[in-house]
Image (tube, helix red, strand yellow):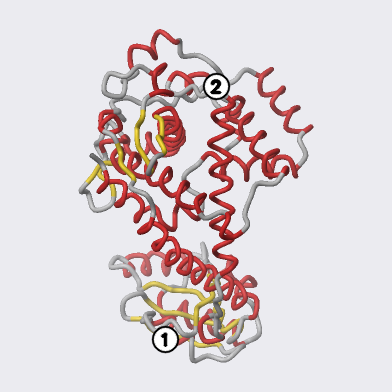
Amino acid sequence: MSKATKAMAVAMTAAMAAGSLAGCGGVSMDKYASTVVATYGDEDIYLDEANFFLRYQQWTQEAMYWDMITAYTGYTDLWTYPSGDGEKTMGDDLKERVMAQLLQTRILIDHASDYSVELTDEDRDLVAEAVKAVRTNFADEFFNYTNPSDEDLTTWFEQNALASKVWQAVKDAADVTVSDEECQEFTLEYVLVPFPSEDSSDTEETTAADAEDGDSTPALEGEDLANEVLSRLQAGEDFSDFADELGVSSTTNSYLKNATDNTTDLFLRGVTMATGDIEMFESPDNGWYVVKCVSDLDEEATEKQRQTAMDEKKDEAFNEVYTGWAEAAPEFKVEDCWNNLSLGGEKIYVAQTTTASEETSASDSDTETTAAEESAASDTEETAAEDTTAAEETTAETSAEESSSAQG
């Protein structure tokens, strides 16, 4: 959660919000805590919980995407904008994901004892901080759309925290290995000199005339520029030594050696180079590459790729375990009330400016907060309140399909 969100001030009146709030099939918000929105076996899941996570995501996503979508797509409402393949709207997608979150949380909690997972006092302290953060980090306007008690927030956040620990335990228990061939990387630094533009002849005549008048030195371009870069490198210079002079900028990237699906000219040439090699070649679609092989086996990049590959395999292992759990889980049914809950029509997020005194107060408060406290609070908010944890991202699509198919 950003500090910009923390700085939000209060402005919208309750009267304005009251006229815009839409109920769930005629259910007023004060009845959400007693309205069943879904069932998981014998467990009733109530609308206040689902609505909180919906509005939480609605608020934060509107802050990030509303202005961009409405400014550049022709749509006046973020939540009517097509999602994915266009078969559903962003609003429908968000509602499915919220239900997927509620379902997955419960499935994971059902298997906490399988891995001897439970919340520690430290976990509960972090949850308490997250509850406080909801009260202090959101403008009052947010609570016109959802207003759970601290006790309810604590319950929901502890459930999410426990589910997250089960997800991690499953990954930690996965017996996976990564071979050298799966992670070895090489690193190239290169300059791409594009083909001269169609009007380059006019430019050449102009620069040549300027040179005769003593105004400037004709600028190199195309193959001439590439050859000059090559010559400088072969003479022992680094790219940075002549970048400003020649008007070029180098790029450094690492590549997986065993990336058989990479058919780019740069990769195919670079994978054959040895450390320190310098080559220039023409790419028919791009221009001239001048390339230096920084390392034909970059240990640091290789280790990062090893960890990435390990995480991917652990995610796959988690998916396999979770799929089995989901198939054997109690029936999950979404009530019509959820379908009737409106999303969109207007922007609920409100960004407001702060006064100088408020900014100073916020700055002083931040100064008093240690880096460790900020990190802990941030981690807890993401784990406890959002539906974008790694576990949920890993299986959100599957869970959304399950929840959608179970609606009745």
**Alpha carbons under labels 2 and 1: distance apart:** 53 Å
- Where's the N terminus, which quadrant? top right
Q: Position of residue 97 (x, y in %)?
A: 37, 45
288 left or right of 73? right
Element type at mark 2: loop
Residue that extends furthest to the top in the rendered view of this protein: 15
- Where's the C terminus, which quadrant? top left
Residue in the picture at 62% in, 42% down? 380
- Please determine whether, in this image, residue 152 is positioned above or below residue 196: above
- Please determine whether, in this image, residue 268 is positioned above or below residue 164: below
Q: Residues within 10 Å of mark 2 (few under 14, many from 20)?
A: few
400 left or right of 374? left
* Residue 243: quadrant of the picture: bottom right
Q: Amino acid at mark 1?
A: Leu
Q: Depth check: 281 or 322 in front?
A: 322
Instruction: Give the residue at mark 1.
Output: 268
Q: Depth check: 138 or 122 in front?
A: 122
Instruction: Give the residue at mark 2.
Output: 353
Q: Position of residue 183 (x, y in %)?
A: 54, 80
Residue in the picture at 28% in, 51% down? 84
- Please determine whether, in this image, residue 327 is positioned above or below residue 163: below
* Residue 341: quadrant of the picture: top left
Q: How many numbered marks, from 0 up?
A: 2
Q: Position of residue 330 (x, y in %)?
A: 37, 49
Q: Amino acid at mark 2?
A: Thr
Element type at mark 1: helix
Residue in the picture at 54% in, 75% down? 254
Sequence-first disc among 2 and 1 = 1
* Residue 53: quadrant of the picture: top left
